[in-house]
Image (cartoon, rainbow, N blue to C red):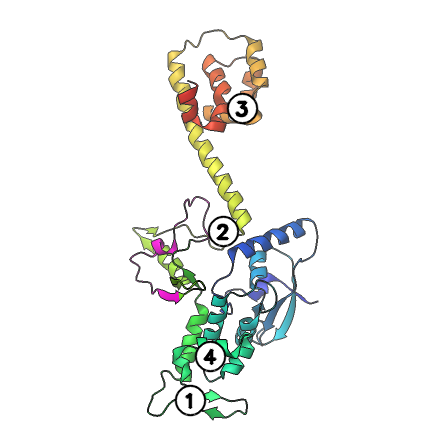
Amino acid sequence: MPTINLAKIDLNASTQTRVATDAQVISDYSLTLEMADQAGQPWPFPAVTVFEDSNGDYYIGDGFHRLSAAVAIDYDKAVPAEIRAGGVKDAFRHALGANADHGKRRTAADVRRQISMACLEWPMYSDRTIAEIVKTSQKNVSNNRPAETKNLPRLGQDGKEYNLTPLNQPTTASPKESSAVAESTRAALTVELDNCPTAGEVYPWVDPIPTYRSLIENSGIKKISEINADGELVEHAQLDLIREWCKMLVDGEPRWPGFRPKPISMEHAIREREKYKREQRQKSETKKLHQLREEIGNSYDKSIPFAHTLIKQTAKSIPRDSIEFTAASLGVSLDTYYARISAGTLPPVELLILLISTEVLEYGFDWVKENCL
């Protein structure tokens, strides 16, 4: 089986035909791939399908979720691929019918979008031909064909054009105009405005993650209304326009700086988010602990003798994390602090701080202040 490096594939080409990629599927795939890679195992998924044009550029025809998972974990090995001759339009045509019988199954909304994109790309193709490309029923195509292509001449299987326009009724769009619409439609990945970006798309300090609608308030970005699979009216907008709006500077700062340059897997994002929260909490508690030391220190007689043995034995029962936390709150290195403990030279206030540090780490300073001090 031939292989191809991710760097050779044009991941930004407009051959993705779903309403949107599924963040949870990408997350699941990335975890599977990461575990296989760590275990020294080969690529755990079926080969992807790519199309190579005359310039040596590669475009995705099938395997968007698998390749997105590889990008998410910075997979640095070659990926098994079925390489076919053709350019971006060939890859796009293949993608319209991909996943009809394997991989992440298409939703009804996905199929409707693919029918619309195929009809706009090839407005003269018959419903039967479009159905063969999208791998759906001819009736489904007929029911979901865009209005601007319904009355255009059709190209029959015999190669002849057949005019379907009723007498005295003008066509709504020429094939050239419809093709231009198709290009802009295919290039635009839309998102539902009342949804939020996934954790993998934003930085860990963003909490809570806002809705797309709140991000583009007063933006003037065009909203697209659509009936979803549940029969509900929902609004979409182009994701690239939302990102561009958020990147625009106001008083030298982005409107919203929360988007990552590229998405990462959900598991990675959640781990990073939890780590960030722990770090921020510890910074806050460290500052409070330092302030407490100063307050108590001002009221204690620092000459009160504390037995060398008491200090050493107390320190033995305190977890290393708590000692590191206390050292950080005092602004000294861990080695220096351990040396002071061993020498039995801790003043009373520092011993008190050491004793409550574990409770602060577990419950927070405010809880300790209310219940213990």
Please state which of residues 48 and 101 is positioned toward the viewer in this rendering: 101
Q: Is residue 201 magenta?
A: yes
Residue denoted by label 2: 200
Q: CA distance from mark 1 to mark 2?
A: 48 Å
Q: Is label 3 or label 1 in front?
A: 1
Determine whether the residue tagged by mark 4 lies in a helix, strand or loop.
Answer: helix
Q: CA distance from mark 2 to mark 3?
A: 34 Å
In this view, 202 is above or below 21: above
In this view, 176 is above or below 300: below
Mark sitting earlier along the chain (4/3): 4
Determine whether the residue tagged by mark 2 lies in a helix, strand or loop.
Answer: helix
Image quadrant in which the C terminus is located:
top left
Please state which of residues 241 and 8 is positioned toward the viewer in this rendering: 241
Position of 201 compared to 38: left or right? Answer: left
Residue denoted by label 3: 323
Q: CA distance from mark 3 to mark 1?
A: 82 Å
Determine whether the residue tagged by mark 3 lies in a helix, strand or loop.
Answer: helix
Q: Position of residue 314 (x, y in %)?
A: 56, 15
Image quadrant in which the N terminus is located:
bottom right
Determine whether the residue tagged by mark 1 lies in a helix, strand or loop.
Answer: loop
Residue denoted by label 1: 164
Residue denoted by label 4: 142
Residue 332 shows in this picture: no
Quarter assignment of residue 184: bottom left
Q: Is label 1 or label 2 in front?
A: 1
Q: Position of residue 338 (x, y in %)?
A: 56, 20
